[in-house]
Amino acid sequence: MISYARQTPEQQPAATALPPAEDHIAPAPRVSVQAFCETVETAAAVQAAGEDRRLGKAHLKIQMGGMAAAVEAYHAAPTPNVIVLEADARTDILTGLDQLATVCDAGTRVIVIGRINDVTLYRELVRRGVSDYVIAPVTAIDVVRSICNLFSAPEAKSVGRIVAVVGAKGGVGASTVAHNVAWAIARDLAMDSVVADLDLAFGTAGLDYNQDPPQGIADAVFSPDRVDTAFIDRLLSKCTDHLSLLAAPATLDRVYDFGDDAFDAIFDTLRTTMPCIVLDIPHQWSGWTKRALIGADDILIVAAPDLANLRNTKNIFDLLKAARPNDRPPLYCLNQVGVPKRPEINAAEFAKAIESEPIASIPFDPQIFGSAANNGQMIAEISANHRTTEMFLQIAQRLTGRSEGKKQKGSFLSPLIGKLLKK
């Protein structure tokens, strides 16, 4: 869809603005992108965009010279999938595009960055087949959004959000939090969701949801050439109307060593069919776990209130903020708070060190959590009014940017009114 940025240069923010929670930008596929810039500032923004995780698969090349350089370059070379052109106010944009059309291959998409905010110009650009027109000055996230939106339908922007949940330390209950939050997303927010248990050797998602599927995520990761929508659908185990599970085998009959991109095909396929994918990431540090974290849309770190967890949370926070400069910072929650006779670091000290408040402090309650684990149930199933049930819902809302769809309370006349409305 062609979009027109109506902001004037004075209205554009000088610094990179992080996208709001509801502004979900789907990653671009493996495409070639070449940018021809007029100014150093635009070239720097495009360069920063190329380092964004959502353009991780795109091959980006930047040149200076604007329209003239583009026309000259493609006289003897094939055009890429996407061309980004900057034109300043002195450049005749339409003439330059007409010249480019004589050397441009069919199917190439063109994004124009200009300084002229005029509806007549926009209509002429649309008539010439320009895919997007963005008003300069641009930020890195502007460039990311413009390129990525070329390959995703506007009505599907809410589809394919990946939420990664990881523990700051082993044994902090990250999997339990992940599974309960996914349950809240599916049940209370009514989003079709899937839990992908990435701890292939010791994963507990199957136990927590009382599922024992014969197939799961291992069948996909060890057969990457077979991964497509139909194949993944066969591997999913149905937990509720809105929640499915991609279970781990939880067996030790093979070694689970993977390359950095081993799960890419699985995640890409899930994005096309599921509005929300919750990744239960094991507490280990490898190329693929780092890639899964950096590539997620939202991240939740689960930590216990002690010194080792504080250090690890700080390290994960710093790494992700540096690797994802155009994304919202990760979120974290404290779990197992209030263990009797255990010295703890309180939430205020945690927040001071991390420079961010925890979104929840889940109390230590071995009775209800133990019962849920042994029965293969969620906390909400055992006690819908338990305080942690509300906490999991609040976490789900923060991660997805959605509110609970509450039903309106009806009066004693509601059944009669409903029948009249049907008639």
Image: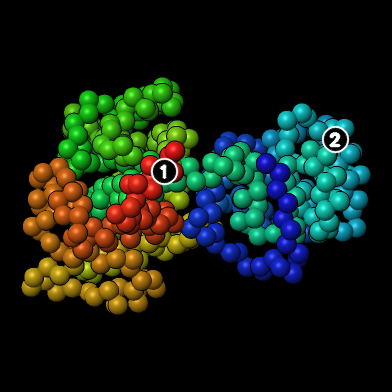
Q: Image check: 384 left or right of 185?
A: left
Total residue callouts: 2
Q: Residue at x 82, y 53 (%)?
A: 119
Residue position marked by numbered label 1 in the rendering: 420
Q: Say if residue 31 shows up in the picture.
A: yes
Q: Image check: 115 left or right of 142?
A: right
Task: Mark 2 or mark 1: name the one nearer the start of the chain.
Answer: 2
- By what rule are the colours in the image chosen? rainbow
Q: Residue at x 42, y 64 (%)?
A: 318
Q: Quadrant of the N terminus?
A: top right
Residue 267 lies, in percent from the top left, at 42, 37
Q: CA distance from mark 2 to mark 1?
A: 61 Å
Residue position marked by numbered label 2 in the rendering: 101
Amino acid type of the residue that numbered disc 2 sits on in the rendered structure: Ala
Instruction: State whether residue 289 is above or below residue 21.
Output: above
Characterize the local packing of mark 2: few (<14), some (14-19) or many (20 or more) Cα atoms within 10 angstroms. some
Characterize the local packing of mark 1: few (<14), some (14-19) or many (20 or more) Cα atoms within 10 angstroms. few
Between 136 and 367, the residue placed more toward the observer is 367
Q: Say if residue 47 shows up in the picture.
A: no
Q: Secondary structure at mark 2?
A: helix
Instruction: State whether residue 32 is above or below residue 289.
Output: above
Observer-side mark, 2 or 1, equals 1
